[in-house]
Amino acid sequence: MTTGPAPAAISATGLRKSFGDHVVLDGVDLTVPTGTVFALLGANGAGKTTTVNILSTLLGADGGTARVGGHDLEAEPDAVRAAIGVTGQFSAVDSLLTGEENLRLMADLHHLGRRDGRRRAAELLDRFDLGSAAGKPASTYSGGMRRRLDLAMTLLGRPRVIFLDEPTTGLDPRSRRGMWQIVRELVAGGVTIFLTTQYLEEADELADRIAVLDHGRLVAEGTAGELKRRVPGGHIRLRFTDPSGFDTATRLLGEASRDDEALVLRVPSDGGLRSLKTLIDRLDAHSVEVGELSVHTPDLDDVFFALTGDPDHEKAAAR
């Protein structure tokens, strides 16, 4: 028996939201397959957090439909809430409580029994490397420890879909990479992650698919590679050890820019397999040997600026 594609963990059609005369979302369509990471990028005011708030039932939409975790957002909000977890930009950790007390409080809110709550809290403290600090007030935790505790609190209810709204803002590089590893482990276990981030590197590292939101509209969606290939500037770099081979390749590849001193040609390319194969076949047909070949594509910074058309933003897709 054949199996079809995994059902969508999140699907939305025509989501709209305005605050007064200001349109924040203008007909947003989204589909997020189960067990994947979906990253939503956009500049300040693009509508990322509004999208998260709507899909997590924290805010009502003015129009459109959505299903999250298999449940209709408008007709079954309680079922949606039971299926999801939300880790926002600002930690939900109570600084006056210890790490263990924060988790036990969440266990009570999820109506777990005393024994189950303690067991689940202990499991999560160990999983997030917080066991040694379990009895210390959260106010003594580092930024990375607080974010791990915050996510552990989100996981206590075993959500199938997790919304992470800029989860690593303010963390040092080591803590950020630790959080990335946790996200990968969650997805490997079948959890779906809806991520907004101000770090384009983060989306590149984690996301199966990326969407770019600009002035309330989705202007692009695809894998990181697909989005990069949409932006001009990609090229194949060829370095030669033999000047005669360099000269022959120059004649064959008239569109290439050349560096005579380094014996390097840069051939415009979308970075795709087909264009690379075509180039290699042309060189091979004339017995041209290449010392070194590398493919260079624009990064997500280039994609973001090209799609949003706003060079004044920093090289990050801020909230």
Image (spheres, grey):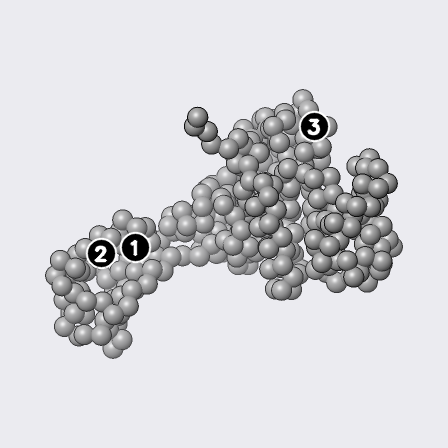
Q: Are marks 1 and 2 in contact (CB under 8 Å)?
A: yes
| Quadrant the N terminus occupies | top left
Q: Do the residues labelled 3 and 1 touch (CB within 8 Å)?
A: no
Mark 3 Cα-neighbour bin, 10 Å: few <14, some 14–19, many ≥20: some
Q: Where is residue 213 in the image (x, y as percent from the top left)?
A: 53, 43
In the rendered image, the vertical position of residue 233 relative to residue 86, given as above or below? below
In the rendered image, the vertical position of residue 190 relative to residue 298, given as above or below? above
Sooner in the amino-acid sequence: mark 3 or mark 1:
3
Sooner in the amino-acid sequence: mark 1 or mark 2:
1
Residue that label 1 marks = 269
Cα–Cα gap, marks 2 and 3: 54 Å
Q: Which amino acid does label 3 sit on?
A: Ala
178 lies left or right of 101: left
Which residue does the image show at 36% across and 60% down from the upper left? 296
Mark 2 Cα-neighbour bin, 10 Å: few <14, some 14–19, many ≥20: some
220 lies left or right of 115: left
Q: Which of 56 and 112 is in front in this view?
A: 112
Q: Which of 169 and 154 is in front in this view?
A: 154
Residue that label 3 marks = 79
Which residue does the image show at 32% across and 63% down from the upper left? 294
Q: Which amino acid does label 1 sit on?
A: Ser
312 lies left or right of 123: left
138 lies left or right of 232: right
Q: Position of residue 222 (x, y in %)?
A: 45, 43
Q: What residue type is labelled 2?
A: Leu
| Residue 109 visible in the current orientation | no
Residue that label 2 marks = 279
